[in-house]
Amino acid sequence: MTDLDAWVFVGIALILFLIGFAGFIKSQSAVRMLISIEIMINSANINFAIFALYNDLTFVTGHVGVIISIALAAAEAAVGLGIILSIFRTHGTIDATDFVKLKG
Amino acid sequence: MALIPTELFQTLELFFFFILIGYTIGSAFLAVTVKSVYHAVLWLVFTLLGVAMIFLLYAESSLLLVIQMIVYAGGITVLFVFAISLSGKEAMFEEQKDLKLLDWRLSFAGSFILLLIALYVLSRVSSIFWQKPDLTNKPSEIDLIRDMAKMLFTVHGGTILVLGFLLLAAMLGSVYLVKKEVEDI
Amino acid sequence: MSELVFGGFAYLIPIIPIIFAFITIFFGKFVDKKAHGNIFALIALGVSFILTIIVSGEVLLRLFAEEHIEESLILMEWIRIGDVSLDFGILLDPLSAVVSLMVALVSFLVAIYSRSYMAHDGSPRYYAEINLFAAAMLGLVFSPNMIQLFLFWEIMGVCSYLLIGYFYDKDVVPEGQPHPASAAKKAFLTTKVGDVFLFVGIILLYLETLAVNHPTFDFLEIRHMLEAGTLNIDPMLFIMIALLIFGGAIGKSAQFPLHVWLPDAMAGPTTVSCLIHSATMVKAGIFLVARSYFVFEYASKEALLVVALIGGITAILSGTIALVKTDIKGILAYSTISQLGYMTIGLGVGGMAVAVFHIINHGIFKALLFLSAGSVIHGSGSQDIREMGGLQEKMPHTWKVMLIGSLSLAGIGNGFFSKDAIILHALHYSGLSTLHEQLIALVWLSSIITAFLTAFYIFRLWFVVFPGTNRLPGHHVHESDHWMTIPLWILAIVSLVLAGYFTIGLFLPDLSFEHHLVHWLQPHEHALDFDWIVGISSIVLAVLGILLAYLIYYPRADAKVSFPKGEPSFNIEVADPDSIAVLQGGFRSITRKIKSTILGRGIQRILEKGYYIDDLYLALVYFVDAKYCAAMNWIEQNVFDGAVRLVGWGGYELCGLSKWCDDHVVDGLVRLTARASLALCSLAKTTDERVIDHGIIRNSAKGVMKTGGYLRRIQTGVVENYALYTLLGAIFLIVVAIIVAGVVPL
């Protein structure tokens, strides 16, 4: 395997994060927002996994971090989609730009 | 492997790496840009698989690959598909509306600043920090996983406990959220 | 002993159709538009067929010349786990050579036939799936180990699912027929039951090889180990392994308990039914047992007894159901199940080679029958034989080839030789005990009765469909075009040539294909010589069956046939009856009388319902489901609700207690306090109004209002904006962190 430096992967993670963030900002559908969040979480996971290997070979905390983060993402997706469903029930739409109840 | 000269092999590997990266980033890009939300979920799956490949090939951890495939690409995406199916036909496509954003340019400017900061930090850190360590003495993956399993229940025991409560709360919460009102039944 | 010359090409045989399956999916829309990409199927299956002729033909020619050749193996390592390696490869031996020839021929002819038959309903998807289906069967036939076999086995399961459900978006389904989508699901799930058995069997056998430190999935290696006696397996476990493997065959080859999917599989296009019935799907089960026959041989004979019994039950059960079916494809479907029962009997009585022999013959004549049935359906626009009749004039090619196929199925053409050999084997089988031999005798009886039934029902079909006058006026009946008739004639000629060749073998045993086959496939067995008494009696039975069908169903000259609704029988009116017609009338009135008794009606009903096996399964599922729900409901009502009520009751009692406290103790205190505070309040009120309200509060409130007025613009309520603030906050924190951590010296 060709030796690639860690910054390559940090860069990839950064690009993924920015794509996810841009998607989050741009999208109107609440489901799309959750998708963007998943992409951002994944970019964080790449960093965890890569630095677990690059910093210390026996240092598995990074992997633990990835696992925890995936579990968090699962919980977040479940709750998020539950919220979307209940919003759909009460409002008949899942267009996030339509709920401006928090507007001051 | 002996059939292919080492240099050519390395070139091929690099080539494959670029294909993988292009694939991952490209599908992430498509996931946030395609019109149909169903297709977005499909591209999300491809992104997740690409990340899983990065875990396997470059973080050298097949465990993470497996977890990523099972939990993410297998489980969460199904949730997405169900959520879209349950929230009616309008949910499948995004209507293009005017953004009610305060100023979306600001957000892209913010992202750009973030990019600049990141690049600056990346350039400042010593190059030793980035270098790939010598992997010859790397313990076998079985040992690593065993270590991790031990750590999960000793050092990180509290975290796991909290995580368990969180998942329980998430489960109850989502059940509560999607439960029909009592009057409906 | 020299190597095979063309053996190296063998791996191309399954690979080419697989590749073309994908090409068809992507380019079928653009190339050969009119026929929906049929050209790809033609090329792929044609090339595959030619290669099969070259490769398998060489094997067979060498076998004829040298009587015995070494099995030829081409292996590529696929996965290696520890000492175990899983290989992909090609096994060339007499069994795979013989079967692959038939499979490749039939699938190629089906591809030709589809060009015209599927001209309206076709799509690239159809041809891709046909390609994949045929490729899977070819790959299965050439499999050298159990894992590859299982893999192709499952691919075939998926393809059958896709093809049976090809018309999944059909809106209207004829009454009494299942919807294609549900038929596909049924086929997939039912065969899956057998697949689970098969997989468990494979793994158990593998564990046994692992126990003697030679883990392998390879057929040849396991056989050699069994022959050398290095594998010592517990006899009961060995029987179980054999039966588990046979369980896979029960599912795939539609044997008795799991045969329910095959009649429903008629919901697919007729070409697909032809593939499933003659070449691919159902033959895979029989082929599996033939391929792993050494397991059955070395296990105790009880395993084979079960096989034979299942075969006997299946043969007679479906043979009787076919008597009352009125759907042309339904009759053929039940006849397939019955013929598969024959093959299973053949396997069960130790005649693996004759079972394989019957695979070949049945493949040819059943493909012929199904393709002619497709031609009939295409021409007459109906599937119900009651609506046909009089097609003989309109379809000059189809009736001839269908007659050849029907004769062959009835046991007069090429089908005779293998069927007779199976009956002969059943007759000469020596069992373990008297009971065993008696059971085998029952199986033999079943096969004899089925031979008679087969001849009867297939000629019932033929006599109702072709002679006489058309009963569905208004539809323009036409003969199919050359794309359909040429494959039919090829199959008919193959059937006739085979019949001729086998007949020569009767008189010159050195040329007898059956003897050669037994010699190649079961070298330790001794081929049974043709028994003229059994042979002639089975021909006599077939002729009797045809004669009976003729007497009851053949409409003579200007006879008019009608099927009144609600009556179990039908009417034939003849203008001026001659002596034969009078005889026929007598037979018909007897039949009608038998059918109109309560017993007759009951039997008819039972047969039409297929012995209520489907309904039984359904009722079983409903029963289990209902019981489960009831149990859950009980738990819910009694356990959970009880707990909730208990908690509620406790809460209620507590509330009562606290109310009492409230009324008596707290209230008094409150009143006392209130008096005191009233006095204080009046004092404070004065101060408040004067000083605080006007002075401090108004002014500060105004200040807050103004500030809020500015700040509320940030609160848009749009989620994205909050995300943006989060980002800006994150940037701020990162900058602070960088500075604090000292990465950037300030």
Image (tube, rainbow, N blue to C red):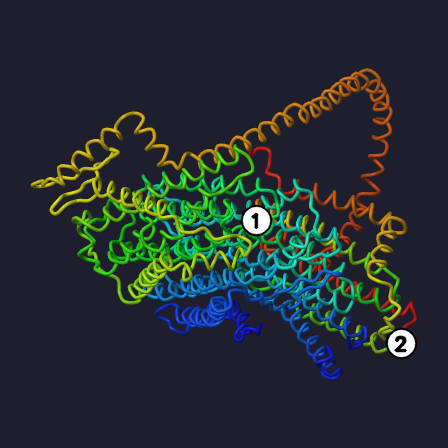
Where on the picture, by quarter, is residue C481? bottom left
Q: Nearer the viewer, mark 2 or mark 1?
A: 1
Query: Residue placed at 62% from the left, 42% from the top?
Result: C240
The mark found on residue C195 in the picture is 1
- Please indicate, yes or no, whether residue A34 appears anywhere in the rendered image: no
Residue placed under numbered mark 2 in the picture: B128
Q: Please indicate whether residue B31 sits to the left or right of residue C338 in the image.
A: right
> In the orientation shown, which residue stands out farthest toward the left?
C576
Residue C417: give x, y in percent of width and height: 38, 53
Frontmost residue, B161 versus C541: C541
Query: Residue placed at 30% from the left, 29% from the top?
Result: C601
In which chain is the residue bearing label 1?
C
Q: Which image quarter is the N terminus of chain C in? A: bottom right
Where on the picture, by quarter, is residue A45? bottom right
Residue A89: give x, y in percent of width and height: 57, 45
- Please indicate, yes or no, whether residue C331 appears anywhere in the rendered image: yes
Where is A68 relative to A51, above or below?
above
Frontmost residue, B33 versus C619: C619
Same subunit under labels 2 and 1?
A: no
Q: Which image quarter is the C terminus of chain C in? A: bottom right
Query: Residue placed at 70% from the left, 80% from the top?
Result: B3
Mark 1: which secondary structure? Answer: helix
Other-residue count near label 1 (Cα within 10 Å), few / some / many at <14 / 14–19 / ≥20: many
Query: Residue placed at 82% from the left, 58% from the top?
Result: B142
Residue C157: give x, y in percent of width and height: 51, 54
* Circle 2/circle 1 CB separation < 8 Å: no
Of the residues shown, which amino acid type is indicated by label 1?
Asp
Where is B92 relative to C629, above or below?
below
Q: Please indicate whether residue B134 sits to the left or right of residue C599 in the image.
A: right
